[in-house]
Amino acid sequence: MLESGFPPDNESLSLAYEESKSFVTYIISKSGKEGILTVLNYMKQGEDVDSAILKALSIPLGELEKKWHRSLRQRVTWFTYISYHLYEILFSVAALMTIYAFIRVIMRKRAYRKEEEEEDRFYS
């Protein structure tokens, strides 16, 4: 995490901001806005991050980070799976669409033939 502060280079700085945003969003999703505001209040009163999180959320910072990382892995798993198998997924969807179109064409041909047979009977 960012215990030592934000990095000086732009690329790492952007990553650090995104990491911070993700962590704060996770805290809000688990304990609401009040939870993060309580943490910030304790820090405003001079508490360090570890004790502020422990007092406000009743969980040690290390444990909170582990849970956050777990939640990130679960989200990334689906994204990773879909992105890794995107070609196969698109191919399968295209194949199903082709089969559907083929069945529709066959059904239309049969309906057209049936109409022709009925017309032939009518005019005969």
Image: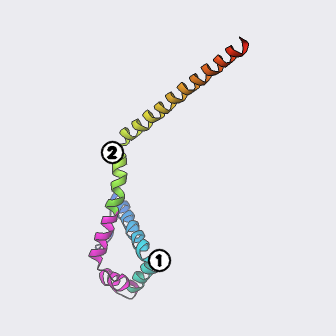
Along the viewing direction, whichever of 13 and 117 lies nearer the viewer? 117
Q: Position of residue 17 (x, y in %)?
A: 39, 65
Q: Secondary structure at mark 2?
A: helix
Q: Is residue 73 above or below residue 87?
A: below
Q: Which mark is residue 84?
A: 2
Question: Is 49 on the left or on the right of 32, as rendered?
Answer: left
Is 56 in the magenta? Answer: yes
Q: Is residue 91 above or below residue 3?
A: above
- Under mark 2, the amino acid is Tyr
Q: Quadrant of residue 123?
A: top right
Q: Secondary structure at mark 1?
A: helix
Along the viewing direction, whichever of 50 and 63 lies nearer the viewer? 63
Span shown in magenta: 43-71
| Residue at the image point whose x is 53% and y is 25% from the top | 106
What quarter of the picture does the N terminus occupy?
Answer: bottom left
Q: Quadrant of residue 49?
A: bottom left
Residues at circles 2 and 1 in contact by the CB criterion of under 8 Å: no
Along the viewing direction, whichever of 46 and 61 lies nearer the viewer? 61
How packed is label 2: few (under 14 Cα within 10 Å), some, or many (20 or more)?
few
Q: Quadrant of residue 8?
A: bottom left
| Residue at the image point whose x is 33% and y is 55% from the top | 77
- Under mark 1, the amino acid is Lys
Q: Which mark is residue 33?
A: 1
| Residue at the image point whose x is 34% and y is 62% from the top | 72
Q: Position of residue 79 (x, y in %)?
A: 37, 52
Q: Position of residue 23 (x, y in %)?
A: 37, 69
